[in-house]
Amino acid sequence: MTDGTELYTVGQIARRTGLSVHTIRFWSDSGLIAPTDRSAGGYRLYDAAAVARFDLVRALRELGIGLEAVRRILARQATVAEVAEVHAQALDAEIKALKLRRAVLRTIARRGGTTEETTMTHRLAHLSAAQRQQVIDEFVENTFSGIALDDDAEVVAEWMRELPGELPDDPAPGQVDAWIELTDLVTDEDFRQRLRQIALAGASSVASRYGLELRSLALRHADRARAESIAPDSAEGRSILDQIVEPGLPGVERDELRRWLETVADARVERYWELIAVLNGREPAPPAMPALSWLLAAMRAHG
């Protein structure tokens, strides 16, 4: 060159940038960075601006941006910021997929299931949010079909649909487990029939009079009895029972209350709410079934 501009050979650029000679030649042959000039022997020469472009292309490629996107940036058809935003969004989706894959693999490793269970685990975990919601919606609709639900039951039915929009970006293996277990539960016909029985029992007069209060009293007194190892059929157990169920309650109503409790106190129903809480990232409510089981045993023992 006659203007005194300093030019660099492919080898010099390789040493300055850390790129391989092969990569420099490939990018040059691809038209990304054309030589500024050629030496008398025909070797490619590049000026300082070209070297800066090599540095830029290397940085973009290390960020995972494809050559076509790089070409658009160099041609000023797109800005680095625009391309970076699109690529960041793509990476977000890829990272989310990888985290889900990791959670599924950990679930499979922990469960140690068969090849069929492994396939099912993978399929269930990768259902879209809409597909997961459809599973639950169909379960609720089919379960309560033909039953006239009162206002409280309608609210409960809506709560039963309460799935998160999607699994967390970094789902814990427990959340993948929860979704798989929930799917098993809602496809269990026996569980559906029990929920129908509970919905029908919820319309009874005894439920409206004692339902919520009975649960609260059982959690307070029966849990204490369990903690103190008081047997339901003991005299002390009878004393605690009297704190939960009014001693003067007529025998007919007492029997009706016990039958209602036998219907609604179901460990699978409680597990349903626990799984919904796990999927929504909430702490499950304290379990009530141990206290209700103690209460039922006491009611049967003492008439």
Image: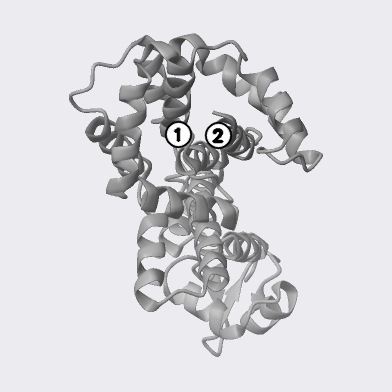
Residue linked to disc 1: 262
Left or right of residue 280: residue 30: left
Residue under the image location 44 percent in, 11 percent down: 208
Q: Nearer the viewer, residue 93 or 160?
A: 160
Looking at this rendering, what residue extends furthest in the right direction? 228
> Disc 2 and disc 1: Cα gap in Å?
7 Å
Left or right of residue 31: residue 287: right
Q: Are marks 2 and 1 in contact (CB under 8 Å)?
A: yes
**Residue type, label 2:** Leu
Looking at this rendering, what residue extends furthest in the bottom direction? 41
Classify mark 1: helix, strand or loop.
Answer: helix
Against 77, is 147 above or below? above
Residue 243, given in percent of the width and then of the height, sits at 70, 18
Residue 225, given in percent of the width and then of the height, sits at 75, 34
Q: Quadrant of residue 274?
A: top right
Residue under the image location 37 percent in, 53 percent down: 184
Against 118, is 262 above or below? above
